[in-house]
Image: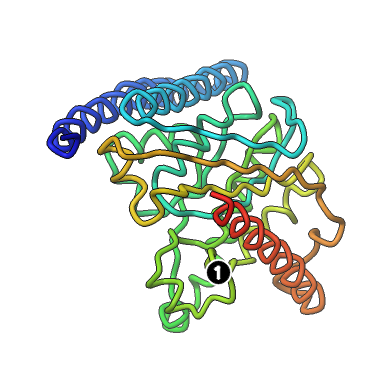
Amino acid sequence: MRTVFIPVIFTVHLTAQIFNLAFWGSLIIGFGLFRLVLPVSSVQKLLATVMQCLLLTFGRLSVALIQLFNPVVIERRFSAPVSRDSWYLIVANHLSYLDIILLIELASNRFPAPKFFLKKELIWLPFVGLGAWALDMPFMRRYSAAHVAKHPHLKGKDIDTTRRYCQKFSNTPTTVINFVEGTRFTAAKHAARQSNYQTLLPPKAGGVAFTLATMGDLFTNILDISLLYPQNRKHPMMAMLCGQMRHIIIDVNVLAVPAQTQGDYFSDATYRTQFQHWLNDLWKAKDQRISHILETK
């Protein structure tokens, strides 16, 4: 009988989520435009704080809608306390666009509002693109190796973007989020990349290495976050919109920032190898932890 109501739940829930996004996104964009035309440091800092509050409110209401339309249990696990007055680097797996909503809500009243590194194409996404721009989130344009070979001047552009934005984040407590796999996990991508991990794609080290090299002295901890949808692993976003989401697990492993994660990743071959070993070991432990959680669920 419940199947009959799925199209109704999908339509109503999607409409509510779009309205929530449009309302708070419009407010953030409006404050962002004020911030653009009022280049006074104290005013800009105040407006930035207001916009971060609006972002967190969006996340809380979006998750409240998820809980309203789904018989879902959201399990948030922290291995150690976190603080709103600290700097964090989040390294997370990536399964769905739903991950972003959950990470924004997770930050509320726990740690500073998150900054995502976004694909350049998302600048055109209604409310999301301009909202992210207003919040000083970096947009990254990724180039294939073949494209860079034809256009050598593009080499290192992502790193330049990372450098500029990391400098902006140094003045106030900030959480920087890096989806280390570089894309959402799918079975097809897992096979195509010949991943050595059961539940993850191979990690990409460059962005994390440069963020740590630029802000490593500021980061209080690394938050190794694993997002899991045990009963809805194939299409979590659609399951959520259709009222079929049952269980969400957000596992937060609070780690110290190791000394060996700070160095010249792009010029020092010895350091690059050392950093890759560190990240691969972290990813191996993460894969084992996710596999264990899924087995017990």
Q: Where is residue 195 in the image (x, y as percent from the top left)?
A: 54, 75
Is 126 left, or right, of 8 in this rendering?
A: right
**What residue appears at the point 45 percent right and 65 percent down from the top-left corner?**
142
In the rendered image, which residue does mark 1 sit on?
Answer: 198
Question: In front here: 291 or 282?
Answer: 291
Note whether 293 is above or below 197 in the view shown.
above
Image position, residue 197 (x, y; %): 58, 71
The amino acid at mark 1 is Gln
Residue 163 on image: x %, y %: 63, 53
**Residue 290 in picture, x, y percent from top left:** 60, 56
How many numbered marks have been drawn onto this rendered protein structure? 1
Where 73 falls versus 226 (above or below)? above
Q: In which quarter of the image is residue 125?
A: top left
**Image point 72% across, 71% down: which residue?**
276
> In which image quadrant can residue 289 be found?
bottom right
How crowded is the residue under tag 1: few (<14 C-alpha within 10 Å), some, or many (20+)? few
Which structural element holds mark 1? Answer: loop
Viewer-closest of 21 and 11: 11
Kindly identify the residue that appears in the image at 53 percent across and 61 percent down: 158
Work out which quarter of the rendered image holds the N terminus and state it: top left
